[in-house]
Image (cartoon, helix red, strand yellow):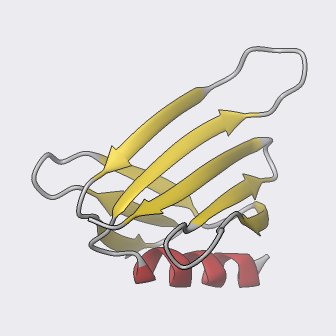
Amino acid sequence: MEGNSKNLITFITEQEGKDIEAILMDEVTGTVGFSFMSYIKSSKVHIQSGRITVSEPKTGKYFCLPMSDIKQICDESCGPYDLALTIEYNNGYSIFIQIFES
């Protein structure tokens, strides 16, 4: 599990300054769960105890990614200009992250 956290930190830190879209999905079968999307332009990455915060300095928009209880990280990239990944957590939530060049 610790390796997943390090991989997530490395990936997100390398994307600083780019536009980042995050979509939270709840995959709980048979119920309607949480879902939301956040689009951050010219991202600023902050590594804190137990989480990664990605913020947009001009507007104050942000989202946070927990670094614990990561079940797996799936690379969804389709080449050097189409970077994406899905982070699956033990609690049933998953977050799809897509990177856009600004």
In this orientation, which residue lies closer to the viewer: 75 or 66?
Answer: 75
Residue at the image point whose x is 40% and y is 41% from the top: 38
State whether residue 86 is above or below residue 78.
Answer: above
State whether residue 61 is above or below residue 29.
Answer: below
In this orientation, which residue lies closer to the viewer: 93 or 82?
Answer: 82
Residue at the image point whose x is 48% and y is 74% from the top: 12
State whether residue 7 is above or below residue 95.
Answer: below
Could you say where residue 59 lies in the image, as x and y percent from the top left? 13, 46
Relative to 30, 61 lies left or right: left
Relative to 24, 15 lies left or right: left
Could you say where residue 79 lies in the image, as x and y percent from the top left? 61, 75
Quarter assignment of residue 24: top right
Residue at the image point whose x is 28% and y is 57% from the top: 55
Q: Number of marks in the image?
A: 0
State whether residue 6 is above or below residue 90.
Answer: below
Quarter of the figure with the N terminus: bottom right
Residue at the image point whose x is 65% and y is 68% from the top: 77
Could you say where residue 25 lies in the image, as x and y percent from the top left? 66, 36
Quarter assignment of residue 91: top right
Quarter of the figure with the C terminus: bottom left
Could you say where residue 83 lies in the image, as x and y percent from the top left? 55, 68
Spot the residue most to the left: 58
In this orientation, which residue lies closer to the viewer: 95 or 3?
Answer: 95
